[in-house]
Image (cartoon, helix red, strand yellow):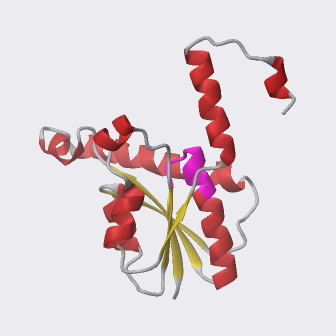
Amino acid sequence: MRKVVVGVTGSPGSLTALHRAAAEARVRGAELRVVLAWQAPGGELGSRNGLGPCALAECRAAAVERLRDALDTAFGAGVPGVTLAGFTVRGTAGAALVDTARDPEDLLVVGTGSRTALRRLVRPSVARYCLVHAACPVLVVPPSPLQAELDAAHRRNFWRIPLDPRELAR
């Protein structure tokens, strides 16, 4: 069966990608698989240094709750109009998505976030990983235009820059 695979984190960018993936699944008559990747605190090395099964179970439960919250935020009480399956996968986001969408007929949908120089240095791009390693087509969804306005408002608040009322009239 053909499937559309999308990664979510709960961020506005991932919710934009989720909506686009649902639309693609409707057009293609495919199943929508929503994947949330998670790792133990400290990554795989952290899980080797004394995290017991109870702590890992709590991490997995937190990931399941984040996935439910993301789906509730995206679709509310309504349904997306396609067969939907949610998965929490332990591992890095790129590897989890590429592994889930391994058939050539699948479609992998990923969102892009803000890619500042510091963020690129600290956290590699999931979209770039998927483009390089996926065996199926990859659709990279840009962030919502509202995200740029939200980021600008956060910067304005951080630097305590007053709001010009003329900006609201635009």
Residue displayed at 39% across by 72% down: 100
Residue 158, position as x, y percentages in the image: 55, 16
| Residue at the outermost right position | 169
Which residue corresponds to the image point at 43% horizontal and 48% vertical from the top-left? Answer: 63
Residue at screen point 64% across, 65% down: 20
Q: Which of 116 and 91 is in front in this view?
A: 116
Residue 96 figure quarter:
bottom left
Q: Which of 72 and 138 is in front in this view?
A: 138
- Above or below, 81 against 88 in this view is below
Relative image position of residue 66 (x, y in whole percent) = 51, 46
Asked whether residue 142 is drawn in magenta, I would say no
Q: Where is residue 88 in the image (x, y as percent from the top left)?
A: 42, 58
The residue located at (49%, 49%) in the rendering is 9
Position of 34 with respect to 134 (left or right) is: right
Looking at the image, residue 1 sits to the left or right of residue 45; the answer is right
Vertically, is 7 above or below 73? below
User: What is the quadrant of the C terminus in the image?
Assistant: top right
User: How many numbered marks, from 0 up?
Assistant: 0
Q: Is residue 156 above or below residue 27?
A: above
The reply to whether the magenta stretch includes residue 14 is yes
Image quarter for residue 50? top left
Q: Position of residue 81 (x, y in %)?
A: 72, 72
Judge from the rendering whether residue 45 lies leftward or rightward of residue 15; answer left or right: left
Per the rendered image, the range of residues in magenta is: 8-16
Q: Which residue lies furthest to the left in this view?
A: 49
Residue 59 sits in quarter: top left
